[in-house]
Amino acid sequence: MAKTRNEIRFLLNGSEQRLTEVGASDTLLDFLRLDCGLRGTKEGCAEGDCGACTVLVGRPQDDGQRYETVNACIRLLPSVDRCHVVTIEHLAGRDGPLHPVQQAMVEQHGSQCGFCTPGIVMSLYALWMESPRPEIGEIETALQGNLCRCTGYGPILAAAKAAADLGAPEADVLVRERDAVRARLAALDDGARVEVARGGDRAILPANVDDLAAVLAEEPEATIVAGSTDVGLWITKFMRSISPAVFIGELADLKGIEVTDAAVTLGAGVTYSECEPTIAEVFPHLAEFWGRIGGQQVRNMGTVGGNVANGSPIGDTPPVLIALGAEVTLRRGDARRVVALEDFFIAYGKQDRGPGEFVESLRIPRPKPGVFHAAYKISKRRDEDISSVCGGFALEVADGKVAAARLAFGGMAATPKRAPKAEAALVGRVWDAAAADAAAAALAEDFTPISDWRASKEYRMAAAQNLLRRLYLETQGGDRPARLVRA
């Protein structure tokens, strides 16, 4: 067993924090506002949707130290062990000049009611440090997770453009002191398992992946927390207890990304942001789709492994990964087994994962030459929204006929699943509009969707059927548009 430490340690702005009474369900937002009096960070939605609670979290990495935006309302306090948390109060001193990003927001009239402004400033601050003169697409991506009801975003976009004229990142405190902060964080890392609690609300941070296996052997029914983008809502919206909770999001052993000629293997703790460059390079059909998973804050926190392990019928990644033929490696103790991802989902809320077993990695085969891949997402709001219907498709056409098909959907059943009747309607047929229509009709045999606040059952079926027709149009090339393109 690894040595144990009974406190979490982190830096908050310029000060070191050592906390012994910390519950698994304690949020970073409540700690900042209620315990520290740092009320610039706001609570809006308490579900990681509006961005008013945005702060930066930095952690040493192999290539330096990068600061990422996160939603403090669903970021759980135990998970910031050995991190540097930066709030809006750290940008400018009480009596000092405004930070360039803040000054730009003033000069461009980027704030009206002001409630969402601190979160927007923190998102633009993170962008300014990485890309001081951003393109409009970079700004829109950085602001995906920040909602503003007042300004219409035009002045905010202008402020993002203007900030570099008011100051360069080289003079910023987080840039100038990055090496010193990195050294301070390294001094907090003792390689120990962390166990803290507040009352009976217990949190465990394993020392490494072997220690994780040992913890889950001791606590087989524990809640596993990776990015908390879903678990956070169990706490804030459903008032559920997650104790004991085992936090795995920052285990280096689960952060690996391996690329071979055959496949990409992602450790279960790899976030959407961390693997985005690899995904875009190896699976180009997922590049645009990946940018529609949550907002930037959610992609910085959420993990692909967690999205799979959670088993939600409307999770974004399972349908597209099933279409690619992905496999999941499960571990209990020292024993491992590999399961095809399509077989991992058994029923609503039930996956092929026993007590004490956890998702260790995902293996995603590279696309084969001659196979057309597509990934589609239908949601009420284009950016930062949950899927109503999601589809992942792999179609092999030889000599004008469909040789093989993998069609997987989310939002159409109690689990993400393939559409065997629709696949059978395609295989062996000439790939034409009539074949797409036949597969669309067969979806009614594959699925009986339900109605909820995201979409009616009729809409879901019609949307899924039309995605197959869109697939046909996009395989034909030419100038005929298959979808509306945002200007």
Image (cartoon, rainbow, N blue to C red):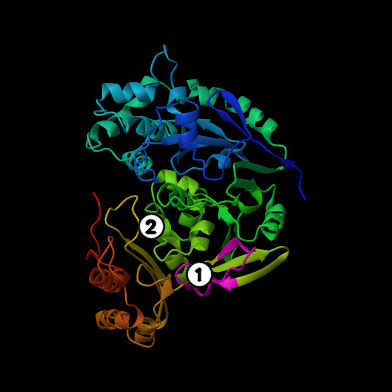
Say what amino acid the circle numbered 2 marks: Phe
- The correct choice, above or below, for 134 with respect to 439 in the image is above
Magenta stretch holds residue 242 = no
Query: Residue 447: horizontal and vertical position, in percent?
Result: 34, 78
- The correct choice, above or below, for 92 with respect to 241 in the image is above
Residues in magenta, as a range: 339-363
- Label 1 packing within 10 angstroms: few (<14), some (14-19), many (20+): some
Q: Is residue 251 left or right of residue 474?
A: right
Tell me whether the residue at label 1 lies in contact with that at label 2, contact meaning CB atoms closer than 8 angstroms.
no
Look at the numbered disc 1 and give the secondary structure of its residue.
strand
Magenta stretch holds residue 356 = yes
Say what amino acid the circle numbered 1 marks: Lys
Give the residue pinned by disc 2.
289
Query: Residue 312: horizontal and vertical position, in percent?
Result: 44, 63
Q: What residue is drawn where x is 69% and y is 50%? A: 208
Q: Is residue 292 left or right of residue 432?
A: right
Query: Residue 301: horizontal and vertical position, in percent?
Result: 49, 46
Q: Is residue 249 left or right of residue 74?
A: right
Give the residue pinned by disc 1.
350
Q: What residue is drawn where x is 29% and y is 53%? A: 382
- In front: 347, or 426? 347
Q: What residue is drawn where x is 29% and y is 64%? A: 452
The quarter of the picture where residue 268 lies is bottom right
